[in-house]
Amino acid sequence: MLTCYFLGNACIEIISDTDHIIIDPIFLVPPQKGIEKILITHHHADHINLDKLAEIDQKHSIKGRKSEIYAPKCVQEEFNIGFNLVEPGSKIVLNDGIVKVYENNCWKAEGCVAFLITIGGKNILHTADAASYSEQLRAIKDTIDICFVACFESNFEDYLEFLKIIKPKLAIPFHYTAEKEDDAKKLMNFLEKNNVDSRLLAIGEALNF
């Protein structure tokens, strides 16, 4: 079984029988214990900070082991930490799957990346807070099971246009705090009205598939 948790902001935790990863770990609800890999899309404070990375190693990683961190150059330029550098075209090998790294266009975040996680026979796309999507991302079509997409109301039309191109089986609004949950609900309803299957995950809620 594959379980995907939304932990607030842009933080997604994915757990399978063989792998345990977390993406953009500015979580509002604590993750499960056993994290092996941390993936970071870019350097903004709502996607990475040193306190959260330390908390993962102290409380949420495998006992006696530090989690492996994967991040683009913009993170290297902002933070003095050790990690594995990724760029568009990079691949991260999981125990039973793979992560492909794509060019991404996040607001005021040159060098931002997106992650396509293939695990447990499912394809999960994490788009950070992009609203203007790269040609690399637009070229992914008809293969995505779940696409996590930000929910800033001024960009609803941009999200819809992208989702109509890649045609995921399910779109899940994310990148919000408890105070902004209504934005996610609005996007879900907007997508449903435009024939894109969508579901709201509350902060801390899990999706099993």
Image: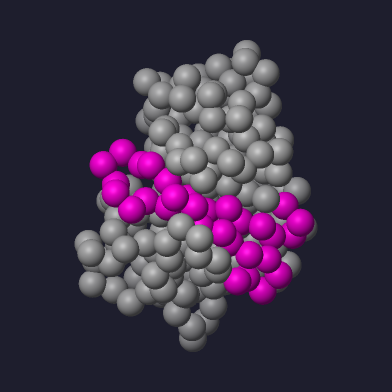
- Whether 101 is drawn above or below 147: the answer is below
- Whether 47 is drawn above or below 34: the answer is above
Q: How is the image coloured?
A: one colour
The span shown in magenta is: 93-122
Location of residue 112 in the rendering, given as x and y in whole percent from the top left corner: 37, 51
Magenta highlight on residue 80: no
Location of residue 204 in the rendering, given as x and y in whole percent from the top left corner: 54, 46
- Whether 164 is drawn above or below 91: the answer is above
Q: Is residue 182 visible?
A: no
Location of residue 183 in the rendering, given as x and y in whole percent from the top left corner: 44, 24
Task: List the single residue furthest toward the top.
Answer: 193
Quadrant location, the N terminus = bottom right
Q: How many marks?
A: 0
Judge by depth and name the residue closer to the eye, 194 or 12: 194
Magenta highlight on residue 94: yes
The picture quadrant where one finds residue 94 is: bottom right
Judge by depth and name the residue closer to the eye, 157 or 193: 157
Identify the residue shown where x is 51% and y is 36%: 149
Q: Is residue 11 left or right of residue 46?
A: right
Task: List the single residue furthest toward the bottom.
Answer: 64
Identify the residue shown where x is 54% and y is 30%: 162
Judge by depth and name the residue closer to the eye, 122 or 206: 122
Location of residue 185 in the rendering, given as x and y in whole percent from the top left corner: 52, 23
The picture quadrant where one finds residue 81 is: bottom left
Q: Is residue 151 visible?
A: yes
Identify the residue shown where x is 76% and y is 56%: 121
Identify the residue shown where x is 63% and y is 49%: 124
